[in-house]
Image: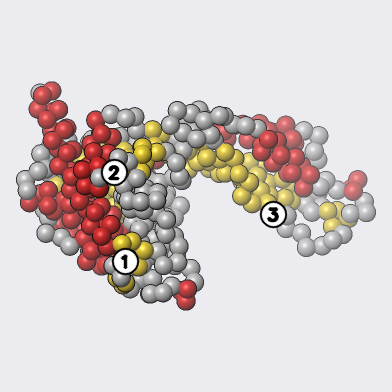
Amino acid sequence: MIDAIELTRELIRRPSVTPADAGAMDIVEQTLRGLGFTCRRMLFGEIENLYARYGTESPNLCFAGHTDVVPVGDVTAWSQGAFDAQVVDGVMIGRGAVDMKSAIAAFAAAAAKAIDAGQVAGSLSFLITGDEEGVATHGTKMVVEALDIEDEVIDHCVVGEPTSSEVFGDMIKVGRRGSINAEITVEGVQGHVAYPHRAANPVPVLLRLLLRLQERQLDNGYPEFQPSNLEITQIDVPNTATNVIPGIARARVNIRFNPRHTGADLARWIENEAAAEAQGFAGTVVVVPQISGEAFLTEPGPFTDVVAGAVYDAAGRAPELSTTGGTSDARFIRALCPVVELGLVGRTMHQVDERAPVAEILQLQAVYERLIERYFQTFSAEQTTGS
């Protein structure tokens, strides 16, 4: 058996700030090998990834998560060492306590119990990355692509992100909005402010373009999703002189969008608006879009029923099925199979003194135990009936 609390502490004590691993993946691999999992380390660039599987038959229920964490910020502001994993008054304090080393430990402990009880009528797998908090180019995205090429079948996936909103078990995520960033560069002609006819000021062009983008109402929402929104995240004019018309101005925008849009469509829209604003301007307007992920939804059905039922059985609460919040690695995994996210209360993630009550970590383990049990009861029975 695995002690989820001690395993959480072991993981927190590895300062795995992206892209560093600091031995965190070794701990996960050793733990799973001890349970009989076949483990594959998948190194892409400098990022450590792990795919581990117990069993060879279908259905294959996968748990996905990440060992990397965000920087601690001001170390002097922490009441305890950020990587000391101290338990104070029943609360685990440390970077990764919520997001999301505790979830990895809880699912490993739940898997150990399920294996010991002979409940795995198929396969259990783990997809763990060290690149979720970073640019996410060499982590789950590349593991999913590799598994897809190899025809590795994952039937359903649970991501251990901290999805609970106010109290444990009040929310699971069944979808996410997509995300696109666009960097806009307007290059004009630098000159003296007293002779504007000899210059081409890029600032008014950039401001008009940003206003055009901001004024459009993208949509009124989509079933299960909130409206899409565009936010201006940066404006930069590298000019320190008061008597110089700058030669360049830059901005960045981000759009969080629902399934009414695709990233490619939004990129074309921004580019078209930029081209329209550039007409008659003695300079250039360049847009560089980067699509972080498309919007997706795991439709309500047997799988979401299994997950929600496990929460109700172990926590006594019927969770809301939500699509709110930011992006996660679920956006990559959805290419392989239906995916939901289920974890602790996320209120302190990325904060100083990130913390999780020990009782809630154990409660999450209990939910995962019931989820595994319900999953194989449901989907192994389906396969038997279908055959």
Q: Which mark is residue 236?
A: 3
Neighbor class of circle 2 (other Cα within 10 Å; few <14, some 14-19, many 20+) is some
From this viewpoint, which residue is outermost toward the front? 316
Q: CA distance from mark 3 to mark 2?
A: 48 Å
Q: Looking at the image, which residue is at 50% across and 35% down?
A: 226
> Separation of disc 1 and disc 3 at Cα?
43 Å
In the rendered view, does 20 fall on the left or right side of 58? right
Return the mark for residue 211: none
Task: State the residue position of label 2.
Answer: 317
Q: Callout 1, which amino acid?
A: Val
Quadrant hosting residue 228 = top right
Q: CA distance from mark 1 to mark 2?
A: 22 Å
Q: Earlier in the sequence, mark 1 or mark 3?
A: 1
Check the picture and name the quadrant holding the C terminus.
top left
Vertical placement of residue 146 versus 16, above or below: above
Residue at image location 93% in from the left, 54% down from the top: 194
Under circle 3, the secondary element is strand
Q: Amino acid at mark 2?
A: Arg
Instruction: Tell me the number on the disc at residue 91.
Output: 1
Can residue 254 be seen here? yes
Disc 1 secondary structure class: strand
Q: Nearer the viewer, residue 50 or 190?
A: 50
Residue 274 at what x, y percent from top left?
Answer: 69, 36
Q: Position of residue 344 (x, y in %)?
A: 33, 53
Helix, strand or loop at mark 2? loop
Which is more toward the observer, 246 or 89?
Answer: 89
Say what amino acid the circle numbered 3 marks: Asp
